[in-house]
Amino acid sequence: MQRYFIKGTVSLNETFVMDDEHVHHIRNVMRAKAGDKFNVVDGEGNAYLVLLTDLEPVSYEVIEKIESEVELPVDITLYSPFLKGDKMDLVIQKSTELGVHHFILYKAERSVVKLDAKKEKSRLLRYEKIAREASEQSRRTKIPGISFVGALKTIDFTQYDLVLFAYEDNNLTGSSIKDILARTSVKTIAVVFGPEGGFTETEADIFKTYENIALGRRILRAETAPLYALSVIGSYYE
Amino acid sequence: MQRYFIKGTVSLNETFVMDDEHVHHIRNVMRAKAGDKFNVVDGEGNAYLVLLTDLEPVSYEVIEKIESEVELPVDITLYSPFLKGDKMDLVIQKSTELGVHHFILYKAERSVVKLDAKKEKSRLLRYEKIAREASEQSRRTKIPGISFVGALKTIDFTQYDLVLFAYEDNNLTGSSIKDILARTSVKTIAVVFGPEGGFTETEADIFKTYENIALGRRILRAETAPLYALSVIGSYYE
């Protein structure tokens, strides 16, 4: 069933006018008629079944609350450098489906791509759209946040209960993700991935005291590694 | 280190002429010089460290055998319908990185794309190239095989020790992959995924007696589901 993220909150059995941004989709893409049902998710992450009551303006009645646990019970922040070409799109879309809560795109020392402020702004809008659409499609109740930051050394990783560092040099000696999760109980996890060219030693030094993870015995591409890790984390909790 | 898959077998301390298909890459892409080292993997999956001895013709001496266990200890066959656009490329590339051994592309009742024999042939060549490059990049010792087949009902699934069926209607009620793997010991696994529009009831009936798997609580796209399942299977064994 089609799902729309709205800005405010709604109440059961009352009628609301749909946010402008979804009107085109309802009228022209879904070609919806009064009586059609869809889902709305409000700004607090509550999901509802609603009934289209009018097209001028597009309005809906809230029928029932959907009690669902589609969100992972841990809050996952994915740290990724900006990846080339459509790889960043892929990571944003797939990681959203796999349940990530925040994307933080940092400047890796070996990052191939450098973005100026204007380009960053336009990319941010693009990624927010990809994350929103992937949230709708995968029936999530939260849209991951996305932000650009500077170098890894400027970030305070002590804010997370658990930091998983995917250092390709330790891929075979690192711990398995599920073993790490099994021996600890956490609410927030940061998972840190490197650029196509790998981390520098300076960057790796930041994570000396954190968990180094293994991602299986094969060498995964920069855009595949997060999908593997998120799948394994998800499968541990769900 | 660069890795080339060759057709025949080689012996330690002897010198061999490189297969024609890799000559261009060695000369013009890697711009290799005599004395450079790289890996070759022979037709039986043995990996060797070799030394370039000559460029005319391109020849190498076999220095040592690389004892590696990059292959999963179970043989995984991925059944996927032919997916639209670049999604099929993505599934072939990523699933190869994640360790799959065979791709079987079947004709789903709700498949969007229909290929004639000529188109199938050209796609097969394309997918074989993607699988070979992904095997080289991820340092595997096996290149997954790829074949096109007919409808699901024409396939004998009793040939596998374990059949995992990813039916979207059972996504929440299906068993977790790791629980299934934990209660059984298998050598061969078939994992069966549906098209963008889902399986028909007739297709689902074929798998009534097999394991229905859950892929987490979110709805994964047709091309994301295999990557999730393969990551979880891989993390169980490695």
Image: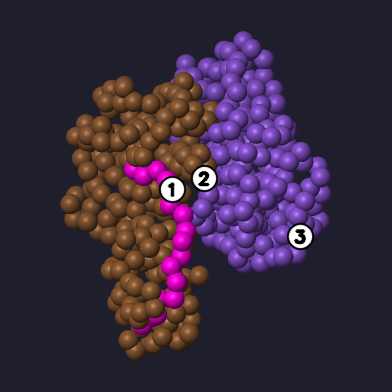
Chain colours: A purple, B brown
The chain to which mark 3 is attached is A
Q: Classify mark 1: helix, strand or loop.
A: loop
Amino acid type of disc 3? Asp
Q: Kindly identify the residue that appears in the image at 33 percent across and 79 percent down.
A: B16
Q: Classify mark 2: helix, strand or loop.
A: loop
Residue marked by disc 1: B72
Q: Kindly identify the residue that appears in the image at 27 percent across and 26 percent down.
A: B206
Q: Earlier in the sequence, mark 2 or mark 1?
A: 1
Q: Position of residue A100 (x, y in %)?
A: 62, 39
Residue marked by disc 3: A205
> Is residue A178 part of the magenta span, yes or no?
no
Callout 3 and callout 1 share a chain: no
Q: Which residues are magenta?
A: B59-77
For residue A153, side relative to residue A226 (left or right): right
Gap between marks 2 and 1, in whole Å? 7 Å
Amino acid type of disc 1? Leu
- The image quarter containing residue A44 is top right
Q: Classify mark 3: helix, strand or loop.
A: helix
Examine the rendering and report whether any part of residue A151 can be seen: no
Label for residue B238? 2
Q: Please state which of residues B75 and B224 is positioned toward the viewer in this rendering.
A: B75
Q: Kindly identify the residue that appears in the image at 73 percent across and 41 percent down.
A: A162
Q: Position of residue A232 (x, y in %)?
A: 56, 39
Q: Nearer the viewer, mark 3 or mark 2?
A: 2
Amino acid type of disc 2? Glu
Q: Position of residue A177 (x, y in %)?
A: 61, 42
